[in-house]
Image (cartoon, rainbow, N blue to C red):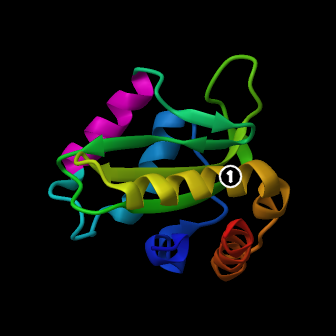
Amino acid sequence: MNLTDVLTQDRVLFNLTANDRFEAITKVAQLLSNSPKIQSFAAFLDALLEAERAGLTWFEQEVAFPHIRSELVKELILAAGFFSPGVFFRENAPLVQLIFVIGAPKKISTTDIVVVGSLARIVSKNKNRLLNAKNAQKFISLLSEYEKQLQ
C-alpha cells in the first residue's frame, strides 16, 4: 500500500484558516466524514479531539499529525489540510501550517505502521517543498515521488 492509495486529491484542502488547533483538526477531519472506512464520524472526531486534549499529537516543526488508533476505523484513513497563516498548537513551537489527520484500525497492522512511518520520513526530509505545494495534485505528486525515493 502506498501513501497515494490512502491520501487522494479529494482528501487535501488548501487555504484553510482556524482560530485554534481543535477547529483546525476538525476542518481536516471533515474530509473523512463520508468515508465508509469509519463506523461513526462523530465518534471518530470526538476521539481525535480527545487525543489532542491529552497531548498525543506528534509534530515535525510546522507539521502536525493528530491521530488515533480505534475500533471505529476499519482501514487506514488519511486527510491533509494547509493553514498558510499557521495555527497555534503548543508553546515554544512554530505555528502549524500542514495537518495530517490519521485514523488507523485498533488491530495491529504492519501496513498502517509502514504507511505512517513513510509519511513521517517524507515530511522530515521534504517539509519545505511539501509546504510550498500549490494544489492537491502537486502535493500528491510530491508525496508519491518522495515515497518512491524511500523504497
Q: Residue 11 at what x, y percent from top left?
A: 48, 70
Q: Which residues are magenta?
A: 42-53
Q: Is residue 138 left or right of residue 116?
A: right
Whether residue 20 is visible to the viewer of this picture, yes or no, is no
Element assignment for label 1: helix
Residue at the image point whose x is 50% and y is 77% from the top: 8
Q: Is residue 6 left or right of residue 84?
A: left
Residue at the image point whose x is 33% and y is 29% from the top: 50
Against 150, is 100 above or below?
Answer: above
Q: Residue 134 at what x, y percent from top left?
A: 77, 73
Q: Quadrant of residue 63?
A: top right
| Residue linked to disc 1 | 121
Residue at the image point whose x is 64% and y is 65% from the top: 14
Q: Is residue 120 left or right of residue 92?
A: left
Q: Quadrant of residue 130?
A: bottom right
Against 120, is 151 above or below?
Answer: below
Q: Is residue 51 magenta?
A: yes
Residue at the image point whose x is 70% and y is 58% from the top: 122
How many C-alpha atoms fall within 10 Å of the one at disc 1: few (<14), some, or many (≥20)?
some
Which residue is situated farthest in the top direction here? 91
Q: Residue 40 at what x, y percent from top left?
A: 16, 54
Q: Quadrant of the N terminus?
A: bottom left
Q: Is residue 140 left or right of residue 22?
A: right
Q: Quadrant of the C terminus?
A: bottom right
Closer to the camera in the image, 18 or 34: 34
The kind of residue tagged 1 is Arg
Q: Is residue 101 magenta?
A: no
Q: How many badges with numbers are in the image?
A: 1
Q: Residue 135 at what x, y percent from top left?
A: 70, 76
The dominant secondary structure in magenta is helix
